[in-house]
Amino acid sequence: MESLQLPEVVQQWATVVLVWIGFGTLVGLLAKAIMPGRDPGGAVATLLMGIGGAVIGCGILAFFVPAMRVKPISVVGFVVATAGAFVLLLFYRLLAGYFFVEGDGGHRRTGVVRRATRRVRRVDSALIDD
């Protein structure tokens, strides 16, 4: 009986996609860890931010240093990708209004969600009859 195997090209593409998913997740998580505060978006947003950061970071490095070609999946690529994801996150927060507020007397948004909490203290009382 023959074992079921995928063609070599499909295996290579699957490997590349899985490596980029892992790499993008690590880069996105590191960028979110460097920049404090709460961020909207879950795992998919973090993954896409990491992959986008790798593309932006390596592209900027290739633009400014044309003699240096960096593979994204390397130590230098990891650092540049993290910087690119950090820049993406920074621009997202700037555009979302986390840092600056336009207009007079507008609602100030600091990026930290604070909920007004009211503490209720219950005291058990006993009625004592003499």
Image (cartoon, rainbow, N blue to C red):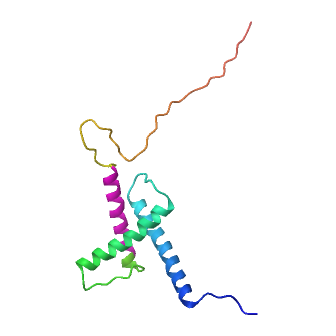
**Left or right of 74 in this view: 125:** right
Return the x and y of residue 63 as percentages of the image width and height.
25, 78
Quadrant of the frame with the N terminus: bottom right
- Residue lying farthest to the right in this orientation: 1
The relative height of residue 76 versus residue 93 in the rendered view (above or below) is below
Residue 16 coordinates in the image, percent (x, y) = 49, 81
Main SS, magenta residues: helix
Q: Residue furthest bottom?
A: 1
* Residue for point 27% across, 35% down: 105
Q: Nearer the viewer, residue 9 or 120?
A: 9
Q: Quick check: 49 above or below 64?
A: above
Which of the 4 quarters of the picture holds residue 82?
Answer: bottom left
The picture places residue 95, in percent across and down from the top left corner, at: 31, 53
Depth check, front residue: 10 or 44? 10
Is 37 located above or below residue 78 in the figure? above
> In the current view of this chain or complex, which residue is farthest to the top?
130
| Residue at left offset 28%, top offset 44% | 101
Quick check: 9 left or right of 111? Answer: right
In magenta segment, residue 44: no
Total residue callouts:
0
Q: Name the residue rendered at 66%, 22% in the picture.
A: 124
Q: Nearer the viewer, residue 75 or 5?
A: 5
Q: Is residue 81 magenta?
A: yes
Magenta part of the chain: 78-96
On screen, residue 64 above or below 91: below
Q: Is residue 60 left or right of residue 127?
A: left
Q: Position of residue 21 (x, y in %)?
A: 49, 72
